[in-house]
Amino acid sequence: MNKSFEKTKGQGGSGAGKPSKAGSRRPAPSTGPAQKKGSAREAALEVLVRTEQDRSYSNLLLHQTLQKYGLDKQDAGLTTEIVYGTIQRMNTLDYFLERFVAKGVAKLQPWVRSLLRLSLYQMMYLDRIPEHAVVNEAVNLAKKKGHQGISGMVNGVLRNVIRQKDTLKLPEHLPPVERIALAHSHPDWLVRRWMKQLGEERTERICEANNVPPRVSLRVNTLKLSREELITRLVDAGLQAEPSDLAPAGVIVRGGGNMALTPWYAEGLFSIQDESSMLVAEAVDPQPGDKVLDCCAAPGGKSMHMAEKMGDRGEVWACDIHEHKEKLIAEQAERLGLSSVRTLVSDARKLPERLPEGTFDRILLDAPCSGLGVIRRKPDMKWSKTEQELDDICVIQRELLNQVHKLLRPGGVLVYSTCTIERGENSGMIETFLQEHPEFEMDPSQPEPLQIYPYEHQSDGFFIAKLRKRA
């Protein structure tokens, strides 16, 4: 199977994080049944080491590790805070650690490097944890995992940090790229790239927003109740809930824990989805009786939203290249009580070989992309991505557009969306497509593509372009 089709779409978080200087940072995944006892910092260390060594997704590793350690809600929140915060601020943490590590941070064993990073993160960014507790826990972990020499080095480095903490400040008058990269902890190449595309001010706002925890947002299933009715139920149960200012079907929830574990979720009253992502189905605007294609559908959120908007009357063909994801889509349709969703396993580029031209009234191509609009949800992404990957993904996007458009009837609507802020994947892709396909034009209902940046609405970065095939 083509790995390039693995999408990086953000989903709402869950649980309750431990408060930091910025308030309650981020939701913690559910811990599940206890299998192994260990401390919050030991669990965090395991996730950080494996994320760096295996290049695995931190959110998936975190969920697995919390289940393995069986931490209570408070410790699970602390582990979550430390993992995401340390990865988010890695650039800045390494910059300061270099002063205290004689042979350099890069030459340390991976677990020692991660231990120092997570300890410094707690000292610099969390205000409820005493510094002596951070040092003691780090030394104990070093003794458990290494030998006396390593524990002594860890002790010495962290006690030196405490003594010189007031001097841990970035130098003034740094060049813009270096200043933003260190202040907001992003790789130099990415800051430089965004500055060329978007300018210094917007780049800094994006990088700053990428370190702010995502909100939990729900999409109400309007076939079962109204948004106002859902909010009333949540508030009556003691939760903080309010309507989204951005998405017509969106609800913002605070203090709800893992909303996917609630009876309301099981009953299909809502789905967990970012507010920006909800705007995609709004752009497609499917009507009852339409035949709609979702080309790269897994895990199915946008397919379900379109089926809900159609009143479950018509057909939504949810296609994905990965066979094992077909089950995820079908399960969502069953949970939400939707009968109009059909599943299809295929490389979307091959669909014109399987289906007649002009089969669909509306097509959504929520394209595989670099995912740089959802860094706040997957902070390890900014360290694992390479510039070459951003260029490679454009080839696949172009191939998809050049094939799936054939399946649209004259007068039909094609919506192209991504969860990135890269110009080449977004407006540049659409400009080229329109030049090469004069039978398409921007839809009059949305004559300009919509580009959402992460700092604008506390939501994911997203791009949505609505095209119409001339009748």
Image: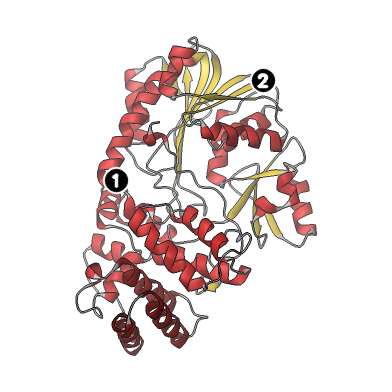
Quarter of the N terminus within the rendering:
top left
Residue at 34% over, 30% down: 396
User: How many residues crowd around disc 1 within 10 Å: few (fewer than 14), some, or many (20 or more)?
Assistant: some
Q: Write down the residue under mark 2.
A: 314
Are dots 1 and 2 in contact, CB under 8 Å? no
Q: What is the three-letter code of the residue carrying label 2?
A: Gly
Residue at 68% over, 53% down: 261
* Residue 74 in view here: yes
Mark 1 vs mark 2, CA separation in Å: 41 Å
Give percent across and percent down for residue 35.
Answer: 58, 63
Give percent across and percent down for residue 462.
Answer: 46, 42
User: How many residues crowd around disc 2 within 10 Å: few (fewer than 14), some, or many (20 or more)?
Assistant: some
Which mark is on residue 197?
1
Q: What is the three-letter code of the residue carrying label 1?
A: Gln
The correct choice, above or below, for 25 with respect to 9 in the image is: below
* Of the image marks 1 and 2, the number of the one nearer the N terminus: 1
- Front-most of residues 395 and 361: 395
- Front-most of residues 43 and 134: 43
Residue at 40% over, 67% down: 86
Q: Secondary structure at mark 1?
A: helix
Circle count: 2
Residue furthest to the bottom in view is: 163
